[in-house]
């Protein structure tokens, strides 16, 4: 066995190509997103790559904070650990520091990538193999005017995509009109789901569902505040529609509660909030025990974490819906990977590890 040495490559940097896509997604000004790229190198010079693009509203972490935690606290804990001994590495960094989900996800992903490369197998083999050759992805519509939303939705359909996720949660009446207009424009063959990012009160959420229940929406994601467990549970029982939770599911413990109470129909898995791959897999197994489906989501990430999410989505039995791995559609020239996007589906490649050869425009890998 070889033993791992590790270092952080380039630290934090701003990805300008990311900003053009995310500028209007939530109806806010352009957001500068920093990425922390982790590089783990074994004794033979083989490298594994991980990424953290933290979401402060989920875990309280910033890129600068993640970089500091990795450099000053966690990296030193895993020097000399066998690159294949993921459990030992995980035990060491969890013993060193609790929490710090984004930092740990980047480190764990790099371990997985390196371990898979040493075995000369694609990452999905580390999860027991792939259940599907390709994964459907969503295109997104942010908070925008009705005409613009309709125009973009029709473009997505003409480009061959089969699923759209619409942001709502600001003005319920306007949201209803916009979603109705998009459904009318793209027809019922297009899958359509909505995400309020916890923006509604119970009365607004109930009103939105009642006014759109005949539109065949695939999922109503995080309509209520993440702390309103009883409200989310009641909304599911009162309406009978498919209720998804994202902000409300950060930990294994929260997943257990929602599964036990049958309080949701879909869990949204973001590695940046679960603290890494293994916790996401555990949450998916909890979901499976309760008949709950999962959506794997890569948010503001580059193709490094997007590729990890793709391998995961191809392997999880409960990942049967379209997934939010949109960087392959929005920034196709950012990276050189073995994964192929065609007609709204990402086909997972068979190269060793995560299958990302380089981040071309950022010159990181």
Image: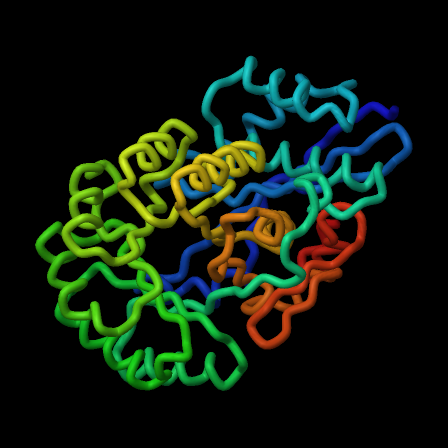
What coloring was used for the rendering?
rainbow
Q: Nearer the viewer, residue 14 or 6?
A: 6
Q: Nearer the viewer, residue 127 or 324?
A: 127
Task: Tell me which residue sits at (33%, 86%) in the image.
Answer: 185
Left or right of residue 240: residue 152: right
Q: Quadrant of residue 144?
A: bottom left
Is the residue 34 above or below the residue 43 in the image?
below
How far across and how far down the image is residue 255, in percent?
A: 38, 34
The residue under the point 21% across, 42% down is 233
> From the viewer's perspective, is 297 left or right of 147?
right
> Which residue is found at the position 75% from the left and 50% from the top?
365
- Where, by quadrant of the figure, is residue 209 drawn? bottom left
Q: Residue furthest top?
A: 95
User: Relative to 125, does residue 29 appear above or below in the rendering?
Assistant: below
User: Which residue is depicted at the point 35% across and 36% down?
Assistant: 259
Residue that sits furthest to the right in the current view: 44
x and y percentages locating residue 265 in the rendered image: 34, 49
Considering only vertical position in the picture, is 310 above or below 141? above
Residue 321 position in % (x across, y down): 47, 59
Q: Is residue 355 left or right of residue 321?
A: right
Mark count: 0
Quick check: 71 left or right of 351?
left
| x and y percentages locating residue 23 in the rendered image | 40, 64
Q: Quadrant of the N terminus?
A: top right
């Amino acid at each position: 066995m070889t033993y791992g040495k590790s270092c952080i490559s380039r630290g934090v940097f701003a990805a300008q190509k990311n900003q053009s896509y995310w500028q209007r997604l939530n109806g806010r000004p352009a957001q500068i997103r920093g990425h922390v790229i982790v590089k783990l190198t074994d004794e033979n010079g083989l490298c594994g790559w991980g990424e953290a693009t933290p979401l402060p509203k989920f875990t309280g972490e910033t890129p600068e904070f993640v970089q500091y935690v990795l450099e000053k606290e966690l990296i030193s804990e895993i020097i000399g650990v066998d690159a294949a001994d993921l459990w030992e590495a995980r035990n060491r960094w969890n013993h060193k520091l609790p929490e710090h989900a984004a930092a740990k996800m980047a480190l764990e992903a790099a371990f997985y990538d390196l371990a898979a490369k040493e075995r000369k197998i694609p990452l999905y083999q580390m999860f027991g193999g792939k259940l599907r050759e390709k994964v459907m992805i969503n295109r997104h519509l942010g908070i925008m005017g009705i005409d613009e939303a309709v125009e973009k939705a029709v473009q997505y359909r003409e480009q061959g995509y089969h699923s759209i996720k619409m942001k709502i949660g600001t003005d319920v009446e306007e949201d209803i009109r916009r979603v109705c207009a998009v459904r009318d424009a793209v027809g019922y063959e297009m899958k359509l789901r909505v995400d309020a990012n916890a923006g509604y009160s119970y009365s607004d959420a109930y009103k939105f569902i009642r006014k759109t229940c005949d539109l065949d929406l695939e999922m109503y994601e995080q309509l209520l505040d993440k702390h309103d467990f009883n409200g989310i549970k009641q909304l599911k029982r009162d309406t009978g529609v498919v209720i998804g939770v994202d902000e409300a599911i950060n930990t294994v413990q929260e997943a257990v509660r929602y599964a036990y109470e049958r309080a949701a129909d879909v869990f949204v898995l973001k590695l940046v909030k679960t603290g890494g791959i293994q916790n996401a897999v555990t949450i998916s197994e909890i979901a499976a025990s309760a008949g709950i489906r999962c959506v794997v989501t890569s948010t503001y990430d580059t193709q490094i974490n997007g590729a990890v999410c793709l391998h995961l989505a191809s392997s999880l039995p409960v990942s049967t819906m379209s997934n939010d791995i949109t960087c392959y559609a929005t920034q196709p020239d950012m990276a050189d990977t073995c994964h192929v996007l065609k007609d709204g589906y990402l086909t997972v490649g068979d190269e060793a590890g995560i299958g990302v050869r380089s981040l071309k425009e950022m010159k990181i890998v």
